[in-house]
Amino acid sequence: EYLSPTGSNSRSREDVYIVPSSSKPIPVPLPRRSVGVKLKQKRVKAILDCIADNPDELTFTKGEVIIVTGEEDSFWWVGHIEGDKLRAGAFPVDYVHLLSE
């Protein structure tokens, strides 16, 4: 329902809308998480040397720690060497051991 300030039935930019008192309040969205909050990263340690066969694969040596950034499937994950984001690519899961946090 609306009321025009002039009392006419024609609507204008100055129309006033009346909201019934029985209306439910508009829900307020929850605040977003802080940008500074970091999710735990999955880290793995190489148990074997691995030489990439393709340009999109990661070469690493036994003992290096890899930060996992994704999973292609259950056999291949994607990540980068800890501390060197430029050394990144897919790697075989069988060549690494999951580190507990």
Image (tube, rainbow, N blue to C red):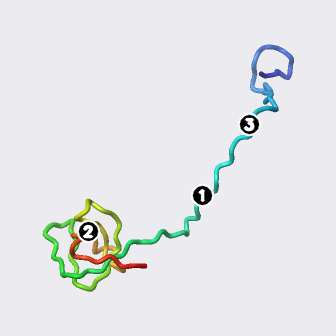
| Displayed quadrant of residue 98 | bottom left
Q: Earlier along the polypeptide chain: callout 3 or callout 2? A: 3
Q: Earlier along the polypeptide chain: callout 2 or callout 1? A: 1
Quarter of the image for the C terminus: give it: bottom left
The secondary structure type at the circle numbered 3 is loop
Point out the frontmost of discs 1 and 3: 3
Report the disc number at residue 24.
Answer: 3
The secondary structure type at the circle numbered 2 is strand
Residue at coordinates 78% horizontally, 30% vertically from top-left?
19
Residue at coordinates 24% horizontally, 70% vertically from top-left?
93
Quarter of the image for the N terminus: give it: top right
Q: Which residue is mark 1?
A: 32
Residue type marked 2: Gly
Residue type marked 3: Lys
C-alpha separation, residue under disc 3 versus residue under disc 2: 52 Å
Q: Is residue 92 left or right of residue 66?
A: left
How many residues crowd mark 1 within 10 Å: few (<14), some (14–19), many (20+)? few
Closer to the camera in the image, 35 or 20? 20
The image shows residue 9 at horizontal and vertical percentages of: 79, 13
The image shows residue 14 at horizontal and vertical percentages of: 79, 27
Q: Which residue is mark 2?
A: 89
